[in-house]
Structure formats: C-alpha cells, structure tokens
Amino acid sequence: MALKFPIYMDNHATTPVDPRVLAAMLPFFTEDFGNAASRTHAYGWHAEAAVDAARETLANFIHADSGKEIVFTSGATESDNLAIKGVAEYYGNKGKHIVTTTIEHKAVLDSCKRLEKQGFEVTYVSPGPDGLVDPDDIKKALTEKTILVSVMLANNEVGTIQHITEIGALTRARGVLFHVDAVQGLGKTPFDVRSMNVDLASLTAHKIYGPKGVGALYVRRSKPRVRLVAQLDGGGHERGNRSGTLNVPGIVGFAKAAEILMQEGEAEAVRIRGLRDRLWHGLTKELDQVKLNGHPERRLPGNLNLSFSFVEGEGLMMAIKDVAVSSGSACTSASLEPSYVLRSMGLDEDMAHSSIRFGIGRFNTEEEVDYVRDLVASRVKRLRDMSPLWEMHQDGIDIKSIQWVAH
Ligand SMILES: *Cc1c(COP(=O)(O)O)cnc(C)c1O
C-alpha cells in the first residue's frame, strides 16, 4: 500500500477518529439531534437514552459501580480542573494540602498553582530517573492537612505507567481522596477504579480514537462518597456537577471508542508494542548513543521517547518532516523550553533538547515503522556527521570533561 505523508506517529497528542466511532456518532447530528435535557418529547428522550447508555459503557470500561459516577465534560483539561478545584473548594475547610507529582499534565499542575494562590499548599513529588514515582515518596508527603492526591496513570511524554494500585491503597488507608488523570493509559494498560481505590478519574475521547472536545470525570459515589463544588454555573446538568448542554454525538462516539477498546484493546496493545519494539530495535541496530527515556518495561505499548546524543531534537524534527512526531522541547509552548517532564527525571538540558517522542497507534503499519526507522537513522547520521562534538566523541574525547573557555 502506498504510504501517506506525513506519517502520523504522534498518537499521544491526539488520535484519528475510528471510522466505527464516526458511524455511531453520525445519526446524532441529524435525525437524533435532541437535547438530552429536553423532557417533553421523544427527541430529548432518545438523546437522553443514548447518553445514559454511554455512561454505563464508560462506567464498565473503568470498572465503576454505576453510570451515575460519570460526569461528562469537554475533555480531560476540564475534568482535571473540576476534580482538583472542585474537591479543594468542597473540602478546603478540612485541610488545605494537596500532593501531586512534577510530571503531571499542565491541566493538573496549573490547577494546583491556581490553588496555591488561594492559600493551598501543594507538594510536588519528583519521579526517579526512569519516570516512576515512588509510592513511598507520596506517603512521606502526606500530612494531617492533605485532602487530595493526584497522580497520572501514564505519562504523556515518556509513557511511564505509575504505581496506581499502591498509591490508592495508601490514600484509602489515610482517608485522603485520590484523583488519577487516566487519559494516556486508558485502554492500553489495566485501569480499575474499584481495585485501585481511585476516587476521581479524568478521561478524554480523543486519545482513544474518539472525537475531540468530549471527556468525563469519574466521581465515586460510595465508600467514600466524593463531593465536588461545580466550576460552571448554569442548568445544573450532570447532577449539579457540570452545567451545559451535553455533546450527545461526542458522548456516543466516546462510548463507542471505549467499547472497541474493551473488545480489542488487549490484542491491539500486543500489536502496537510489537511495532514500537521493531522501531526501537531497528534504530538501535543502526545508531549508537540512543537513550530510551522513561521506564524500559512499565511504559505504554506505543510510546518510544528517545534522545539522540549530539543531535538537537528540533533540528532532527525538521530533517524528518515526513513523520509527524513531537520533540522534548516543543510540547509545552511555542518557546524552546526543554520538557519539564524530562528535566524532572534528571535529564540534562542537552539530552532533554535532543529527545523525540514517537507515539505509535492503531492505524500505524509495519511498512510505516520501517520507513521511519530508515529515515530517522539516515538523518541522525547526517546531522552527527556535521557536528564537531560528534567528531570529538568519535575520537574518544569525553565532551563533558572539556573546560570550555570564553575569551
Ligand atoms: C491530552 C491530555 C490531557 C488533556 O486532555 P484534553 O481532552 O485534550 O483536554 C490531560 N492529561 C493528559 C495526561 C493528556 O495526555
């Protein structure tokens, strides 16, 4: 089959909508266009029934007790905001301390920063060099004042899968609420809010081959019952947790995307991991001095975050325009700040700047992987051939030992 360029390998940023998801959504734009809050006619009832079925599907997907625990939102950014600010506002008089990690998504970190301005104290736990957060470090950070712990299921840059079960056991024992941004791990690694003692979980459709602009927040209803202060005022939709007319086609698509993963997720993970490993082995066979960022085993099947020594990530991205990927410098903003995730794992600025994130997904093929391997290998070689530092390295000079003198 002819390759389509640029080859999309940025599936942590977003994913294409699966055609089966689109087909499920389409009727809800046209003939079944009702407002799920309209109680007076069949258009509304039909939309409401579709939304309620979607709630049940998503609840099953994460092993929640009931569809009533699913609050639909505009995406995981909103879910993270609602979870953290909503809990802080409700339980703030019980304590004003939150524990999270330095490698969370900005939606979590910036929500925490906002709360710090409002008098909350936040402890940011750093991961080890492999991107794994030690549950013991979370435990040590807990105080009498802690009301919430927020740790992501899997990191969006390095793919490291956190010890959610262990952290959930200790938050439950201490009576502290536990929020998990589950976006990246959903359908790719086991996630069970019941056995993991998760109290709130952020989900989004567009990272699992569903549409953009629809997500959900799981809010536990018993043992313990979690309470939130809504962050949007209005019609009191979603049991008062999130006002706003529901995105019915989006919600239907979200549930369809979840249903597909429930049926095919395990086999898909095996296939995608095979492609990821094929790329890794192919690249390391061709190239020296390639560093894998993140944990070698506890990582998402499609994630390959690599630093190519002596090659700048942005420069490499320019040289491989046939492939759509992300670099360790560009993900947070338009400025070339090195990734805060890689930095807090202890990577020096050069290695953080030389990183590329490959995110392999459902629609990637072996043929694409082989094309990308050959392209990346040849361009890295070419860029290194132009680098005086690489030449010195080849001559056996330890670059780090050089005393650079400014005249
Ligand atoms: C993409 C992402 C989000 C944001 O989700 P949106 O639905 O795009 O707002 C939050 N957390 C993580 C870990 C993500 O990867």
Image (spheres, grey):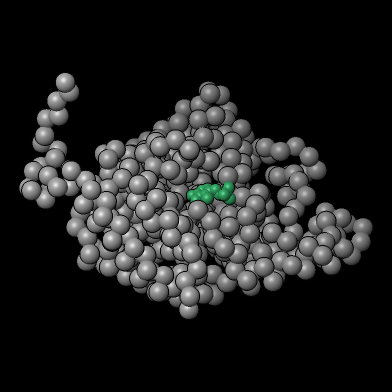
Left or right: 332 in relation to 232: left
Left or right: 179 in relation to 215: left
| Quarter where residue 25 is shown | bottom right
| Quarter where residue 42 is shown | bottom right
Q: Residue furthest top?
A: 407
Is residue 54 visible in the rendered image? The answer is no
Instruction: Give percent across and percent down for residue 193.
Output: 52, 57
Left or right: 309 in relation to 273: left
Q: Residue furthest right?
A: 40
Instruction: Give percent across and percent down for residue 100.
Output: 44, 39
Left or right: 221 in relation to 199: right
Give the residue drawn at x 53%, y 41%.
Answer: 107
Foreground residue among 374 and 107: 374
Give the residue drawn at x 11%, y 50%.
Answer: 394
* Above or below 274: residue 141: above
Foreground residue among 177 and 49: 49
All told, the count of numbered labels is 0
* Above or below 293: residue 345: above
Instruction: Give percent across and percent down for residue 191.
Output: 48, 61
| Quarter where residue 212 is shown | bottom right
Give the residue drawn at x 54%, y 29%.
Answer: 114
Foreground residue among 50 and 272: 272
Is residue 207 visible in the rendered image? The answer is yes
Instruction: Give percent across and percent down for residue 357.
Output: 38, 54
